[in-house]
Image (cartoon, rainbow, N blue to C red):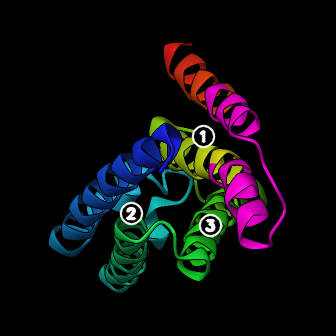
């Protein structure tokens, strides 16, 4: 397994653990959502909406953790990509279409995480998919792709 996939697995577990924390927070006190995420219209946030958000976050966390455990499972990997794509779409629509979420750190962090996985996660599947379909990828090509992705991750965290 490539070094990048091991890093991706660790990152998925970390994101899953943080999501479980957000789930607990959503069930404990719904003001968490109005103070951190939906600051544009905090009066729209109620207990029911917070618990629904919590269940959605918990489901995404479980899927991402399962992917970290079995990252070679292409179907599970694609479902995990979809969880990040849906999160990205949700937060972008809440910020720019519905105007219920201002671009605070509470919204920017999930956008960054979802965008990063969608970009890096999709890019890394290419060599794995090539091998699965019988196309030949040299180890040098795969290593070059992994180095580029690792540099992208490293540089985006430094900036």
Disc 1 or 3, which lies upstream in sequence? 3
Q: Which residues are magenta?
A: 121-147
Task: Find the distance from the CA under tag 1 to the CA under tag 3.
Answer: 23 Å
Is 15 placed above or below 93 here? Answer: above
Tell me if residue 142 is in the magenta stretch. yes
Q: Nearer the viewer, mark 2 or mark 1?
A: 2
Q: How dense is the environment of label 2, judged by Cα within 10 Å: few (below 14), some, or many (20 and up)?
A: many
Q: Residue at x 65, y 33 (%)?
A: 143
Q: Quadrant of the C terminus?
A: top right
Q: Are marks 2 and 3 in contact (CB under 8 Å)?
A: no
- Residue to which mark 2 is pinned: 68
SS at badge 2: helix
Where residue 115 appears, as percent x and y from the top left, is 65, 48
Residue 149 quadrant: top right
Image position, residue 126 (x, y; %): 76, 55
Question: First in sequence: mark 2 or mark 3?
Answer: 2
Q: Label 1: state its secondary structure.
A: loop
Q: Which mark is residue 103?
A: 1
Q: Is residue 112 above or below residue 122?
A: above
Marks 2 and 1, the one that precedes in the sequence: 2
Is residue 46 visible in the rendered image? The answer is no
Q: Is residue 120 magenta?
A: no
Q: Nearer the viewer, residue 38 or 106?
A: 106
The local secondary structure at tag 3 comes to helix
With 123 as the anchor, is 63 left or right in this view? left
Horizontal and vertical percent position of residue 71: 47, 66
Return the residue at label 3.
81
Could you tell me which residue is drawn at 34 percent across and 68 percent down?
Answer: 69
Question: Residue at position x 56%, y 52% from top?
Answer: 40
């Amino acid at each position: 397994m490539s070094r990048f996939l091991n890093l991706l697995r660790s990152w998925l577990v970390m994101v899953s653990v943080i999501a479980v924390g957000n789930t607990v927070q959503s069930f404990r006190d719904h003001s968490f959502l109005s103070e951190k995420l939906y600051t544009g219209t905090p009066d729209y946030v109620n207990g029911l909406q917070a618990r629904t958000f919590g269940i959605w976050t918990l489901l995404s966390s479980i899927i991402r953790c399962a992917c970290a455990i079995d990252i070679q499972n292409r179907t599970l990997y694609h479902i995990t990509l979809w969880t990040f794509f849906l999160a990205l779409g949700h937060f972008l629509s809440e910020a720019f279409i519905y105007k219920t979420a201002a671009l605070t750190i509470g919204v920017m962090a999930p956008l960054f995480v979802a965008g990063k996985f969608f970009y890096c996660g999709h890019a890394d599947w290419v060599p794995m998919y090539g091998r699965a379909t019988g196309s030949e990828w040299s180890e040098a090509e795969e290593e070059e792709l992994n180095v580029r992705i690792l540099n992208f991750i490293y540089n985006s965290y430094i900036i």
